[in-house]
Image (cartoon, helix red, strand yellow):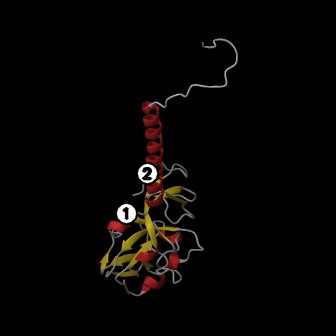
């Protein structure tokens, strides 16, 4: 005879539904995929830094945040006109420098009478005013196989490859390409040009 009233210390075992298990596993897989994608994006593109100083005005302003694309130069080399982020002489104890590439490996650079010459031809670009200080580029410089000559857009307020303590930038010291600029400093968000 079955007992219908009173306390019972025996519970029925509930069966685990396969649909619930499938749903839980799909959530876990989604979280793992999202974490992996976040890691990849942060590793390759996610370095954020700020521009220090006025050397890149009007393109980039003092204090303006930028994202660095570290992946861009894994497949290709920097080209003239690219805005690169580098550590001068590979010094890990300094801030990132943000400058524009004006010449690449094997090219010659010289500044005469305030004008930039690459491979003996004057660079006719509205970006650069007359350059007041030629620095080490007063005499012709031939860049090595992995060297780049970089300058700030606001060249008369820039410490760049013309400076003896920076000089031509080695390919190994370039962290990546300045890719995206944040709002701030009087500039809109957008790609760095």
- Quarter of the view holding residue 115: bottom left
At a point 46% along the width and 48% down the height, the residue shown is 32
For the C terminus, the quadrant is: bottom left
Of 2 and 28, nearer the camera is 2
Compared with 7, 129 (above or below) is below
At a point 31% along the width and 82% down the height, the residue shown is 106
Compared with 43, 18 (above or below) is above
At a point 64% along the width and 13% down the height, the residue shown is 3
Q: Which residue is mark 2?
A: 37
Q: Label 2: how many residues lie within 10 Å, few (<14), some (14-19) or many (20+)?
A: few
Compared with 35, 140 (above or below) is below
Of 157 and 177, nearer the camera is 177
Question: What is the residue that sits farthest to the front in this orientation?
Answer: 1
- Which mark, by number, is residue 48? none
Tell whether label 2 touches label 1 (CB within 8 Å).
no
| Percent position of residue 154, x then y | 48, 66
**For numbered disc 1, what is the local secondary structure?**
helix
Of discs 1 and 2, which sits in the foreground?
2
Q: Label 1: how many residues lie within 10 Å, few (<14), some (14-19) or many (20+)?
A: some
Q: Which residue is mark 1?
A: 72
How much space separates mark 1 and mark 2, taking CA atoms? 17 Å
Of 13 and 157, nearer the camera is 13
| Percent position of residue 35, x then y | 48, 50
**For numbered disc 2, what is the local secondary structure?**
helix
- Quarter of the view holding residue 25: top left
10 vs 119, left or right, is right
| Percent position of residue 4, x then y | 63, 12
Compared with 42, 160 (above or below) is below
| Percent position of residue 149, x then y | 41, 76
Res. 108 in view: yes
């Amino acid at each position: 005879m079955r007992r219908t009233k009173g306390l019972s210390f025996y519970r029925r075992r509930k069966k685990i539904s396969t649909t619930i298990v499938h749903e839980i596993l799909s959530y876990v897989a989604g979280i793992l995929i999202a974490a992996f994608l976040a890691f990849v994006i942060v590793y390759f593109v996610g370095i954020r830094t700020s521009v220090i100083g006025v050397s890149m005005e009007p393109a980039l302003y003092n204090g303006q945040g930028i994202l660095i694309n570290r992946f861009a130069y894994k497949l290709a080399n920097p080209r003239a006109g690219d805005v690169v982020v580098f550590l001068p002489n590979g010094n890990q104890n300094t801030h990132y420098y943000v400058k524009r590439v004006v010449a690449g490996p094997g090219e010659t650079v010289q500044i005469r009478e305030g004008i930039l010459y690459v491979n003996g031809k004057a660079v006719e670009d509205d970006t650069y005013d007359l350059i007041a200080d030629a620095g080490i580029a007063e005499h012709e410089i031939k860049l090595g196989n992995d060297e780049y000559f970089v300058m700030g857009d606001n060249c008369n307020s820039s410490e760049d490859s013309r400076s003896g303590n920076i000089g031509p930038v080695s390919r190994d010291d370039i962290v990546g390409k300045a890719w995206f600029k944040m709002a701030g400093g009087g500039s809109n968000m957008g790609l760095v040009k």
